[in-house]
């Protein structure tokens, strides 16, 4: 396929794929609708020391439907990209942060990771496979790694990792993320 056809096809796909609030016209209010724009699952910084923060940058409805499970020392939260800078000001810069959105077509996780890096966070990663890949890998074999009813159709979409993504700094795979979660809970 020539480059123009590929680009056109990608634009069409991106315009019809649900699950990425970055492309949504409601991005201004794409936070979580919770107090201060944050939905939390798992460790709360006030309750115990957070060793890893998982930041889902999708809409609240999608976060509520399916997200990576939090747990002891792992905070799983939903924050819109628009609210991220304001909310992240209260976070410890030394706690590793992993951002994710829906899948490889959604660029909001990379945008969020870049923002956090510019704010001085020491360990920031983007899990570009997103909740769709995480669901596909773990819903049968390790359901404890997921939370929510998991009813949205985009979770079923199989989207391969783009070849050029492997070479980008700060991008992690599902296996690397799973190891980070295990390490944080020890």
Image (cartoon, grey):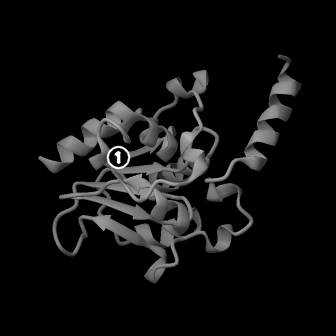
Q: Which residue is mark 1?
A: 123
Q: Residue furthest left?
A: 186
x 23%, y 65%: residue: 43
Q: Nearer the viewer, residue 21 or 126?
A: 21
Q: Residue furthest top?
A: 1
Q: Is residue 175 visible?
A: yes
x 54%, y 45%: residue: 155
Mark 1 burial class by Cα count in 10 Å: few <14, some 14-19, many 20+:
some
* 180 left or right, relative to 1: left
Q: Which quadrant of the figure has residue 105?
A: top right
Residue 107 picture location, percent across and down: 62, 46
**109 in relation to 163, above or below:** below
Residue 165 picture location, percent across and down: 56, 28
x 52%, y 30%: residue: 168
x 71%, y 56%: residue: 23
Q: Which secondary structure lies at badge 1?
A: loop
In the picture, the quarter occupied by the N terminus is: top right
Residue 131 picture location, percent across and down: 48, 46
Residue 133 picture location, percent across and down: 48, 38
């Amino acid at each position: 396929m020539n480059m123009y056809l590929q680009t056109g096809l990608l634009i069409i796909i991106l315009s019809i794929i649900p699950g990425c609030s970055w492309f949504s016209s409601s991005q201004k209010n794409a936070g979580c609708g919770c107090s201060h724009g944050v939905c939390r699952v798992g460790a709360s910084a006030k309750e115990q020391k957070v060793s890893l923060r998982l930041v889902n940058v999708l809409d609240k409805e999608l976060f509520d439907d399916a997200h990576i499970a939090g747990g002891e020392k792992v905070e799983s939260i939903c924050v819109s990209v628009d609210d991220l800078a304001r909310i992240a000001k209260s976070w410890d810069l030394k706690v590793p942060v992993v951002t994710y959105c829906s899948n490889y077509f959604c660029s909001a996780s990379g945008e969020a990771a870049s923002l956090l890096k510019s704010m001085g966070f020491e360990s920031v990663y983007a899990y570009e496979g997103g909740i769709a890949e995480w669901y596909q890998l773990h819903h049968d074999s390790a359901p404890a790694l997921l939370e929510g009813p998991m009813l949205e159709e985009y979770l079923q979409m199989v989207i391969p990792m783009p070849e050029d993504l492997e070479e980008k700094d700060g991008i992690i795979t599902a296996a690397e993320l799973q190891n980070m979660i295990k390490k944080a809970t020890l």
